[in-house]
Image (cartoon, rainbow, N blue to C red):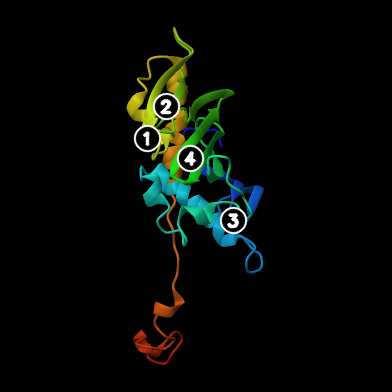
Amino acid sequence: MNSDSVRPAVTELRLSAFKIHRGVTLPLGPLTLLSGGSGSGKSSALQAYAILARLGSGESLARALEEVAGGPSACVPVGARPDGQGRRGFRIGCTVDGPAGPVSLDLAVQAEPELRIVGERLTGGGETLLTTALTDPTRPAVQAAWHTAGATPVTRAPLPDDRLGTSLLPLRVAGKTAGQRLVLAAAEQVVVALRSAFVCDPRPEVMRAVGAGGAGGGCGGDGG
């Protein structure tokens, strides 16, 4: 997909370390079906996609995870042990294709003891367009560096640790250099694709029973 007329779309979902998944890459197309037995991780994959979509829509990390049963800790890979500081987390990402070409977004999220995004990486066009890293655990911010390709190769600034940095770039990058314009095009492509996603979760228990209140007595009936 390389035409300006093509709407950005998520073409790959990465579950590097999320719930029961480790090192899993799921290719996505216009219609993708996930199959597998109970407990195989289908719902987990959809949850990861939903988290990315909500972050791309500008929601806070806590809000993006509020629908996950068990909270942020439930997203940590099964069997993962905390490090020396008691920290555990998960890693997810995606690739979005569109006018800017393939753009990859990868996130590292700390779930315990505090919920925060501790690392983000945006790549595209053969360049690393954005990186963030937690440099001071006492501050609610990460140190970000984005591609500039001007008088200085990168621009550095703090970003909040509870928001997707990629979604904030259009508000922070001026677009004066070719490098900055590449960053903006890639970030906007990812945000547009993620904001297009929404959760459709049918609940059979609240659906109307078959034949209850149907117009004309049901499909194919004599009622015309």
Residue 184 disc label: 2
Tell me which label, 4 or 2, sits earlier in the chain: 4
At 46% from the left and 39% from the top, the residue drawn is: 117
Where is residue 183 shown, x and y percent of the image? 45, 25
Q: Amino acid at mark 4?
A: Pro
The residue lying toward the viewer, choosing from 46 and 215, is 46
Q: Amino acid at mark 2?
A: Leu
The amino acid beneath tag 3 is: Thr
Is the residue marked by circle 1 packed among few (<14), some (14-19), or many (20+) residues within 10 Å? some
The mark lying in front, picked from 1 and 4, is 1
SS state under label 1 = loop
- Work out whether residue 195 can be spotted: no
Distance between the Cα atoms at labels 1 and 4? 31 Å
Q: CA distance from mark 1 to mark 2?
A: 25 Å
- Near mark 3 (Cα within 10 A), the count class, few <14, some 14-19 or many ≥20, is few
Counting residues from the start of the chain, the first of labels 1 and 4 encountered is: 4
153 sits left or right of 216 in the view? right
Q: Which residue is mark 4?
A: 8
Q: Tell us which disc is closer to us: 3 or 1.
A: 1
Pinpoint residue 44: horizontal percent, then vertical percent: 56, 58
What is the CA distance from the residue labelled 3 to the residue labelled 1?
A: 37 Å
What whole-number distance in Å separates the C-alpha atoms at marks 4 and 2? Answer: 14 Å
Amino acid type indicated by mark 1 = Pro
